[in-house]
Image (cartoon, helix red, strand yellow):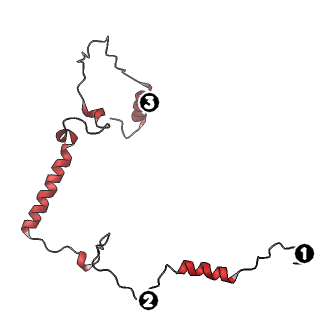
Amino acid sequence: MVEGKCTFGTRMPIDIHMLNEIIYREVKHFKNYKIYRPNFGSIPVTGKFYAAHDQLTAESQEQTELVDDYTHNVAQTRAKGPRSKYSSPATENQSYGWYTTPLVPMDRNDTRFYHPMTESPQTKIEIIISMSNPKNKKD
């Protein structure tokens, strides 16, 4: 290097042997296949609606009845809810709405313990908004 000359932007000399070794180690674990053979035995993650082998075949009457019975049973089970399945709440979130009857019976006519708010600011605003809407007005 020349003394007093600006060396900004100049590169260090590349050791070609070091570069060749780096490339060799990177490429060593890769193999480039020239012929691709798909594995037809594997099950695809998603089906293709346009593929001939994924099309629905004509079902017999028995198969159709079995499917209908199964879907009916699933719909009934889902409609029952967790109360018919479990005797007590299975999760913490279920415990909030599980017990609907109060522990202590309350007389709602006794105003000493029962103080319902007849009108709150939120409900008052909601009533004003709903009444000012011309679509909701009753003629």
Residue hosting label 2: 34
Q: Which structural element holds mark 2? A: loop
Residue 112 on image: x %, y %: 32, 10
Q: Residue furthest left?
A: 62
Residue 64: image x %, image y %? 11, 65
Q: Which residue is mark 1?
A: 5
Residue 135 is situated, as x and y percent measured from the top left of the image, at 37, 41
Which residue does the numbered mark 3 point to in the structure image?
Answer: 125
**22 or 107, which lies in front?**
22
Q: Amino acid at mark 1?
A: Lys
Q: Residue at x 28, y 37 (%)?
A: 94
Q: Mark 3 against mark 2, which lies toward the viewer?
A: 2
**Camera-nearest residue between 94 and 79:** 94
Q: CA distance from mark 1 to mark 2?
A: 52 Å
Label 3 residue SS: helix
Task: Work out whether mark 3 precedes mark 2 in sequence or the reverse, and give the earlier one.
Answer: 2
Tell me the kind of residue under disc 2.
Lys
Q: Considering only vertical position in the picture, is 72 above or below 24? A: above
Q: Is residue 128 left or right of residue 106?
A: right
Q: Is residue 27 above or below residue 78?
A: below
Closest to the observer, 44 or 114:
44
Circle 3 crowding by C-alpha within 10 Å: few under 14, some 14–19, many from 20: few
Residue pictured at 39% horizontal, 33% vertical: 131
Q: Which mark is residue 56?
A: none
Give the CA separation, mark 3 to mark 1.
80 Å
Residue type (three-letter) at the residue carrying disc 3: Ile
